[in-house]
Image (cartoon, rainbow, N blue to C red):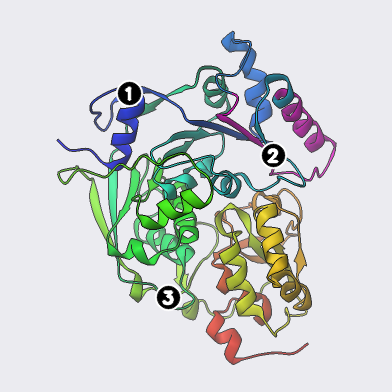
Amino acid sequence: MGMTMTQKILAAHAGKDEVHAGELIQAKLDMVLANDITAPVAIGEFPRFGRKDVFDRKKIALVPDHFAPNKDIKAAAQCACMRQFAREHGVENYFEVGHDCGIEHALLPEKGLVSAGDCVIGADSHTCTYGALGAFSTGVGSTDAAAGMATGEAWFKVPPAIKVVLKGAPRKWVGGKDVILHLIGLIGVDGARYQSLEFAGDGVDALSMDDRFTIANMAIEAGAKNGIFPVDATARRYLGEHGAREPVAYAADEDAVYERTVEIDLSSLKPVVAFPHLPSNVRTVDAAGDVPIDQVVIGSCTNGRISDLRIAAEAMAGRHVAPAVRCIVIPATQRVWLQAMEEGLLKTFAEAGCVVSTPTCGPCLGGHMGILAKGERCVATTNRNFVGRMGHVESEVYLASPAVAAASAVAGRIAGPATSQSNRQTF
């Protein structure tokens, strides 16, 4: 019986010739990640493993990004805990506010810390992002992260897989966010529960790396253990440009077993929006109706990369944010911030009436930099729209692409970029 991409990576890291769905294994890790919410808990558990030092100073990444820059005393204490642990144990990959800051799931690939064929755990559910590079990466709890930091190993139940065959190429204004929201709308938020979403087909070639990061990032919103893409020329080029380790490319066997196959014609997709309060509550923008909004957030580990900001700036150029709307733009890393500045994107946003933040998760989890009051609505390029996700339990979050988010900011209601451009408004 053949193996999927994920199963092959897990077998290699478990020292086995083959593994099968449902099998329990112990696997060696290439990277262990934690942030300012989850790392302090892991650090508190670390002494229980009886180790004086971490298993590998180069294979641990600690990234304060959720409540950083510190929003209050408790947030400051959490970051101080991480900072002290990193210094005591010589953790090389510690990235905080300023010169090396960024949102963890954008920062690690950008710095070449994950490569194809790696086995990665992170104490954050969106660690599945790195599947875009052909790695097995998944979220774990803080205790498992502590065990990983101490031993360099983690246990897994080998997941079965769903094959997602992508065909054709997306049209203008349709990107990775539309693809993954469409898929979640098809299969539901539990449609891939504890399964691997394995992407294939000629449509993969039409997707940029940023599109793939977005899609892999939100595999967890379908309940998946991980999402993973083939290691093609696009992935290899990205890895090379970012100084990652030599990739180890695994391909699924022809006789690999899948629970089911889902086919998506990328050329037929339209820009979409996920209405409250589930990522699966998906509608096309042209069927959204008249939904006035109060806030727009463009950023996050899902859509805060440079191509996302370029798309948003293009949709917003020469226009102005509607008077009743607050638009917050958050580049995902310091490098993205600098590039956006050099390209004039930040000027475009500022002239349109947006506020531009330093890299932070901030509003995505209801942390800071954009909390919603009772009754307010927000269109966000983030990954979750659960009840109370961005503030008051009676607020609403609508998930969308950077193109739709920017167009909506201009229109003052949910709108697609084509609508925004055909109905230009001056304020």
* Among numbered discs 3 and 2, the one appearing first in the sequence: 2
Is residue 101 left or right of 183 when viewed as pictured?
A: right
Residue bounds of the magenta highlight: 57-85
Q: On the image, which quarter does residue 261 sit in?
A: bottom left
In x, y percent, where is residue 183?
Answer: 38, 60
Q: Give the amino acid at mark 1.
A: Leu
Going by the numbered disc 3, the residue's amino acid type is: Lys
Question: For the residue carrying disc 1, how many other residues have a C-alpha within 10 Å: few (<14), some (14-19), or many (20+)?
Answer: few
Q: Residue furthest top?
A: 50
* Circle 3 or circle 2, nearest the eye: 2
Q: Quick one: label 1 or label 2, which is nearer the N terminus?
A: 1
| Residue pointed to by mark 1 | 24
50 to 367, vertically: above or below: above
Q: Are marks 3 and 2 in contact (CB under 8 Å)?
A: no
Q: Secondary structure at mark 1?
A: strand
Report how far apart the C-alphas of labels 1 and 2 lie in the structure: 33 Å
Q: Is residue 271 visible?
A: yes
Vertical placement of 410 versus 389: above or below? below
Residue drawn 49% across and 21% down? 152
Quadrant position of residue 343: bottom right
Which of the numbered marks, if any, corresponds to residue 270? 3
Residue at figure coordinates x 73%, y 40% from the top left: 96
What residue is disc 2 on? 95
Q: State yes or no: discs 1 and 2 in contact (Cβ < 8 Å).
A: no
Helix, strand or loop for disc 2: loop
